């Protein structure tokens, strides 16, 4: 299974179950995606915990009036099919969420990438 889709599924399932936090196996890429979630206000605090092989990311989940802040995730790029866009083609998320993009300047949401005038690979749309 794709580790990024696994991360999104873990977050969605934890929020549906009403958990306060979720633990995700650590990788630099997943940690950067979690930072974008934090900057966008979709999750609370994120922390890297554990040592050596047993590292994980602990994400404090956010709820708005009892409803999960992350209601759904649409994975755009998949391991078998990558989608790239220029900064001029960047559009806001359709459902009022954020679009996560992997750029040469790092992982960003669509607003940050448009402001920096960089394009890249579209990872997912989160709302």
Image (cartoon, grey):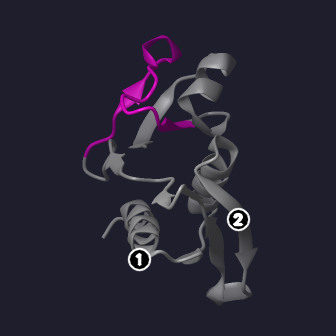
21 relative to 93 in the view: left or right = right
Mark sitting on residue 17: 1
First reached walking from the N terminus: tag 2 or tag 1: 1
Q: Quadrant of residue 82?
A: top left
Query: What are the residue bounds of the magenta stretch?
Result: 81-102
State the SS at label 2. strand
Instruction: State yes or no: residue 119 in magenta.
Output: no
State the SS at label 1. helix
Of 29 and 68, the residue lying toward us: 68
Question: Which residue appears at 64% of the width and 53% of the height?
Answer: 32
104 relative to 19 in the view: left or right = right
Quarter holding the N terminus?
bottom left
Number of numbered discs present?
A: 2
Of 64 and 93, the residue lying toward us: 64
Of tags 2 and 1, the one toward the viewer is 1
Badge 2 local density, few (<14 within 10 Å), some, or many (20+)?
some
34 is higher (above) or lower (below) than 81: below
Residue sitting at the far front: 65
Of 99 and 123, the residue lying toward us: 99
Quarter holding the C terminus?
top left
Question: Which residue appears at 46% of the width and 53% of the height?
Answer: 70
Task: Give the residue number, with chain letter if any, for mark 2.
Answer: 46
Q: Position of residue 50 (x, y in %)?
A: 72, 86
User: Could you tell me how far apart the alpha carbons at marks 2 and 1 are, in whole angstroms?
Assistant: 19 Å
């Amino acid at each position: 299974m794709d580790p990024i889709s696994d991360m999104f599924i873990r977050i969605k399932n934890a929020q549906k179950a009403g958990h306060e936090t979720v633990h995700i196996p650590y990788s630099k890429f997943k940690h950067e995606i979690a930072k974008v979630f934090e900057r966008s206000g979709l999750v609370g605090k994120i922390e890297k915990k554990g040592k050596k092989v047993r590292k994980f990311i602990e994400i404090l989940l956010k709820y708005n009036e009892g409803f999960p802040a992350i209601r759904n995730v649409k994975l755009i790029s998949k391991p078998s099919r990558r989608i790239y866009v220029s900064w001029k083609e960047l559009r806001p998320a359709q459902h009022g969420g954020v679009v996560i993009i992997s750029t040469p300047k790092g992982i960003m949401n669509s607003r940050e990438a448009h402001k920096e005038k960089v394009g890249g690979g579209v990872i997912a749309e989160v709302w």
